[in-house]
Image (cartoon, rainbow, N blue to C red):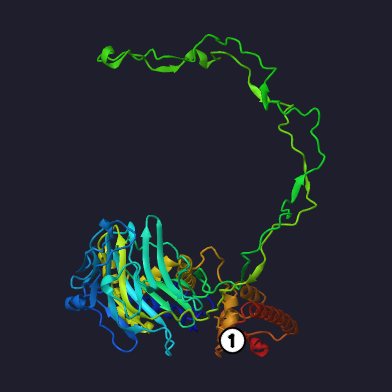
Amino acid sequence: TINAPFPPRCEFWLEDHLSIDIVAMLVFIVLVAMITSVISDEDGQVPFQPPTIPTGDSVYFAETFNDEDQFSHRWIKSSAKKDGVDEDISKYDGEWALEAPREGGFEEDRGLVVKSPGKHHAIAAKLDKPFDFTGDSREMFVVQYEVNFQNGMTCGGAYMKLLTQSVDLDLAKFNDKTPYTIMFGPDRCGQDSKLHFIFRHKNPITGEFEEKHAKKTADFKFFDDKKTHLFTLIVRPDNSYSILVDQFSVNDGNLLEDFTPPINPAKEIDDPDDEKPEDWDEREKIPEPGATKPDDWDEDAPMKIPDPDAVKPEGWLDEGAEYVPDPEVEKPADWDDDMDGAWEPPMIPNPVCEEVGCGEWSPPLISNPNYKGKWSPPMVANPGYKGIWKPRRIPNPDYFEDTEPYKMTSIGAIGFELWTMTEDVHFDNVIITRELAVANNFAFEGWLKKYELQRKTDGTYLPGWVTYFTDMANDYPYLWLLYTTIITLPLIFLFCICCRTKDRSSPPRDETAQRKKTDEPSPDDPPQDTEEKEEVDKGGPTIEEKEEVDKGGPTTEEPVEESESFVAEDENEDAAVSQETVQRETEAEESTKPTKRKRTRPKKAELED
């Protein structure tokens, strides 16, 4: 801390000696941020290295599509036909290819690309080992993959199907009817966009499967930005789930609460055999019995009648036409009556009628004061009203309670079964694992590199921490207010501490009061010329004599007569001088309290000498 006041000439101000540690801390934070930006924003493109294929018991499938030989042996293109459609479009004859992204990607980084618009595509691969949800490990399920809509998306899907494990699973016959356990991924047609999470739940009583759909997530912008996006699904043993896009959560929920239709059916249902009694009256109001129409009620009276007080305006042209031929239009020179017919000029409103009116005059219509409309009896409370009938409730014979819907059917293969009107949908870096850390590391080595490269290409790249916080605020706009507050408050605080200049209009500082507060020594008072002169005029010693006496030197020797009148007069003058001196010292002590200066006067004997 600063223990001494700043010099008066200093333009910067620290009130009450505030600590500069805060200023140092803020400067340190700014420097760290600048260094981080420089380090993370290195020029040049890092050579491409494909993600390392993770191994271990927690990994069930991992694919980067960079090994063409492995792809040809692992992935099987379907040759099946789609049921219920015309022969011409029933075949899964859409083409697939391994290609690098056209923009914002690495030339050596290839992915699986949909090549045939308007056709059905189907391709699948078996997992390294089946994923069993009912095992003893009780760990989470994580599936993650990348999608790039290189041409945008008008209508089509980019979702994957995790196929149910079975002994008769034939990937060459993979189609829309092949049983699956989970369907996950984006889908769009027109203005309707979705991010599917569907799983097939098995009824423990009947053994039948029913699709359960997660609640709809918010609309997305990733269909049109032509960037690579990362989609992640996490399902946990406690029945909770999370859907992430680019590692930001967009949908969190619970399998028991956030799916339609619900996992567990209702305990009670309406009795299908119960029927409403014939005498059950659901009418809350009925016409008043015995009510009759009044004799003066005229149901035929019109709602509007001509105004009897209306009078035809003067100058009204009863024979005048409302429209007349335009006199300024002439017949075209090339008009052929034989070919084009008789020429007629266009009609315009009659200018004569604009002031008063033309044609047959009729009075305006007004509301009929005698109009009552069709009569109906007033409604009264129904004494026989029993309420709205409902069938009785009975226990649901199909009721069951599944408290662990996480225990889905085992997954044996992964596949893409799609129809799209937009080609060049790019898939890459697929992984299925039980450990979220493995999936995150896989994304760090693959998707994150492409994400930063695409941002640098289109000029929207922000280094490291800036990108993270910006993307988070784009997903949650209220964070912009928080960021603004966090940035603004330290700046205001720093300004108030270090950059506040002196107020020129404020009154000058009281130097005397400041010395009293700090015990700062003050100079001696200047000699009071007027008082000294008066003292000399009265016969007292001169200023030079007093100074010599103060220094201990000799006084001026002049002969003085020893008389009683002189001594008495000198005593009176000496008393007056002493009184004035005491008064001046008291006033100076009260105003400035300086170091006391004792005034030395010559002794009476010396003056007599």
Residue 545 visible in the picture:
no
Q: Position of residue 50 (x, y in %)?
A: 23, 78
Residue nearest the observer in this picture, 455 or 55: 55
Judged left or right of residue 15, residue 563 is: right
Residue nearest the observer in this picture, 152 or 190: 190
Q: Position of residue 276 (x, y in %)?
A: 68, 58
Q: Position of residue 236 (x, y in %)?
A: 45, 81
Q: Is residue 328 above or below residue 434?
A: above
Q: From the image, tell me which residue sits under label 1.
A: 557
Judged left or right of residue 173, residue 247 is: right
Q: Is residue 379 above or below residue 235?
A: above
Q: Is residue 253 above or below residue 119?
A: below
Q: Position of residue 102 (x, y in %)?
A: 21, 64
Which residue is at 77% across, 39% downward?
Answer: 377
**Which corner quadrant of the image does residue 463 belong to?**
bottom left
Disc 1 marks a residue whose amino acid type is Glu
Q: Residues within 10 Å of mark 1 (few under 14, many from 20)?
A: few
Judged left or right of residue 220, residue 589 is: right
For label 1, the SS is loop
Which residue is at 63% across, 78% downward?
Answer: 588
Outermost residue to the right = 290
Which residue is at 43% across, 73% downward?
Answer: 200
Residue 28 visible in the picture:
yes
Quadrant of the image for the C terminus? bottom right
